[in-house]
Image (cartoon, grey):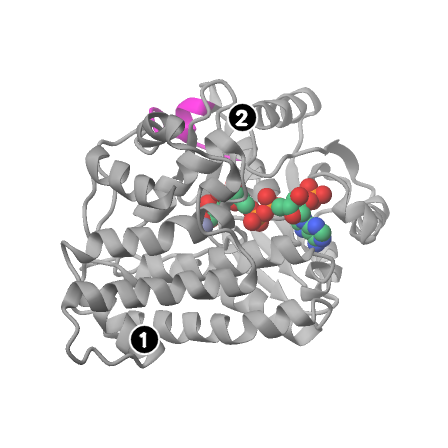
Amino acid sequence: MNFTFHNPTKVYFGRGKIGFLNDEIKKGTKVLLTYGSLSIKKNGLYDEVRAILEKLDCEIHELSGIEPNPKLSSVRNGIKICRDKNVEFILAVGGGSVIDASKAISIGAKSDTDVWNLIIKKEFPVDRIPLGSILTLSATGTEMNPNSVITNDENNQKVGFAHRPFTFPVFSILDPTYTISVPRNQTINGIVDTISHLLEQYFNAEENAELVDRFCESSISYMMEIAPKLLDNLDDYKLREAMMYTSFVGLNGTLSVAGGDWATHEIEHSISGIFDIPHGVGLAIITPNWMKYVATKKPDKIIKLGKKLFNLDQDELTDIEFCHMVANKFKEFFKSIGVQTSLKECGITEDSLEILVENTFPINDKIGEYVELVRDDVREILKSSM
Ligand code: NZQ
Ligand code: ZN
């Protein structure tokens, strides 16, 4: 598979790197500071950022309250501020939701079309307001990739998009210190999301991608190894550092050169778009059931993963039985770290099956690359996830 690789995001990684805001933001810039709810005020990051921007004589405007699973309405609010105030730079301080919403704001503010048309790729951006980020939650990889996922609050469609090069952050500050306040449940969600990104890229359809496969296998293995240690020591800087590194390398493009499946993510986006559950929870529910379902069509890489990652022996087991064993290993792991593994546990019942199937396909009629799935396949995966 041929590919072009270009990742323009400058990453400042480590303790105290926030000082580089002074190099990245010019004096007197009109800045839109975007953030979520209270987390950055509680951990002191808000005051720290404001102090730096004030010292730089920046004109500061704010968009607060960006919600987890960020909504189109928040994006529209941000675009309005950018236009009204002639904002020159957007500084996103938060987790994936804040950064994703800010990416959409940055292209939407510089486009004549409605931003939803850019999100669903009906139209394309020609410019953007530059965006920098300070990441506070390790999970999505959005800090060094061009992706963004926005939920349309009018129809609950949750759509992922990327517009290269416009939606790459110009820079991202990754200081593990700011992730120490992430509570246990959100840390768990981040662990699941990181593992899921590695799995999605592992399940590419490329035959000559052994090194990508090995990177993914060892990164998943490493995440599974440190996860229980981190959950027992949420304020351990070194473990937070390890997770921050794994999650951003896990989805910054280097492992996507051979493609990736992403069906699990598409199904999950339908769930969290409608029911507003955390992305990581939806992934933990769908992953083992996706694996069991595609095992009936293409078991090879699931078998390879089981042997490499868990040192499992196939013995007398059929391919499908072996794949079920691998899928159950993931389910056991997710249970062991305390995340839900069925839709029922989130209050989601079969009544919602059809809308969940429909919203998995907001744009295309097929998902998946390792195994292509259509509505009937997704219905089966969702049924087995109930
Ligand atoms: O709103 P605040 O107060 O900041 O609280 C947030 C939020 O409630 C809290 N939090 C964040 N940093 C914290 C903190 N609490 C304490 N201390 C801190 N340092 O955590 C909660 C969840 O935040 P959110 O940003 O929603 O989490 P995450 O980073 O997991 O982002 C999830 C979103 O990203 C999308 C997901 O679908 C979901 O919408 N994704 C984006 C991707 C991308 N752009 O590449 C890829 C992913 O696959 C994913 O789909
Ligand atoms: Zn994800």
On the rendered structure, is 220 left or right of 227? left
Queried on whether the Cβ of the residue with tag 1 lies below 8 angstroms from ligand 2, the answer reads: no
The answer to which of marks 2 and 1 sits earlier in the sequence is 2
On the rendered structure, is 277 left or right of 124? right
* Image point (76%, 48%), residue name: 40
Q: Main secondary structure of the magenta part?
A: loop
Residue 211 in view, yes or no: no
Q: Nearer the viewer, residue 363 or 384?
A: 384
On the rendered structure, is 79 left or right of 50? left
Q: Tag 2, which secondary structure?
A: helix
Number of residue marks: 2
Q: Which residues are magenta?
A: 116-128
Pinpoint residue 76: horizontal percent, then vertical percent: 58, 23
- From the image, tell me which residue sits under label 1: 214
- From the image, tell me which residue sits under label 2: 72
* Image point (74%, 55%), residue name: 22
The image shows residue 182, relative to residue 278, as above or below, that is: below
Q: Residues within 10 Å of mark 2 (few under 14, many from 20)?
A: many
* Image point (55%, 69%), residue name: 227
* Alpha carbon separation for disc pair 2 and 1: 38 Å
Q: Nearer the viewer, residue 349 or 253?
A: 349
Q: Nearer the viewer, residue 341 or 365?
A: 341
Residue 75 colored magenta? Answer: no
